[in-house]
Image (spheres, helix red, strand yellow):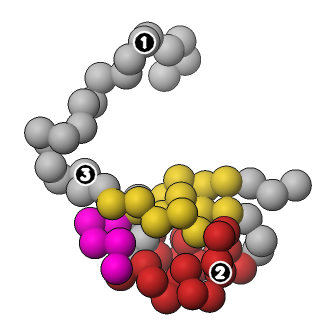
Amino acid sequence: MTKVWFIIGTSKGLGREFALATLKRGDRVAATARDTAALGDLVDRFGDAVLPLRVDVADRTRYSTRSPRPRSGY
């Protein structure tokens, strides 16, 4: 069964290696990076198995750390 992974920081380093390993095993990746141009080679190689998303987790003005609703067990 194909899985979908949401991996941050896929332009380099550990995030990149996780994305590559995941894609090589046939799963799909929502790949985040500050600059999605850095993900072009992944898209070229793995096609629509990669969903490039521009996300800058350091930009606190754009994202909330609060969950929209409480979740038990977290």
Quadrant assignment, res 18: bottom right
Q: Assign a secondary structure to mark 1.
A: loop
Q: Earlier along the polypeptide chain: callout 3 or callout 2?
A: 2
Q: Nearer the viewer, residue 48 or 66?
A: 48
Which mark's residue is nearer the viewer, 3 or 2? 2
Q: Residue at x 48, y 22 (%)?
A: 74
Q: Residue at x 33, y 60 (%)?
A: 54
Q: Amino acid at mark 1?
A: Arg
Q: Residue at x 42, y 12 (%)?
A: 69
Q: Quadrant of the N terminus?
A: bottom right
Residue 12 appears left or right of 73: left
Q: Is residue 24 visible?
A: yes
Residue at the disc numbered 1: 69
Which mark's residue is nearer the viewer, 1 or 2? 2
Residue at the disc numbered 3: 57
Q: Position of residue 51 (x, y in %)?
A: 54, 63
Q: Earlier along the polypeptide chain: callout 3 or callout 1?
A: 3
Q: Position of residue 66 (x, y in %)?
A: 29, 23
Q: Assign a secondary structure to mark 3.
A: loop
Q: Residue at x 65, y 80 (%)?
A: 46
Q: Is residue 14 visible?
A: no
Q: Which region of the structure is painted magenta?
A: 33-37
Q: Amino acid at mark 2?
A: Phe
- The relative height of residue 62 versus residue 59 in the rendered view (above or below) is above
Estimate the spatial distance between the alpha carbons at disc 1 and disc 2, rounded to whole Å.
35 Å
Estimate the spatial distance between the alpha carbons at disc 3 and disc 2, rounded to whole Å.
25 Å
Residue at the disc numbered 2: 46
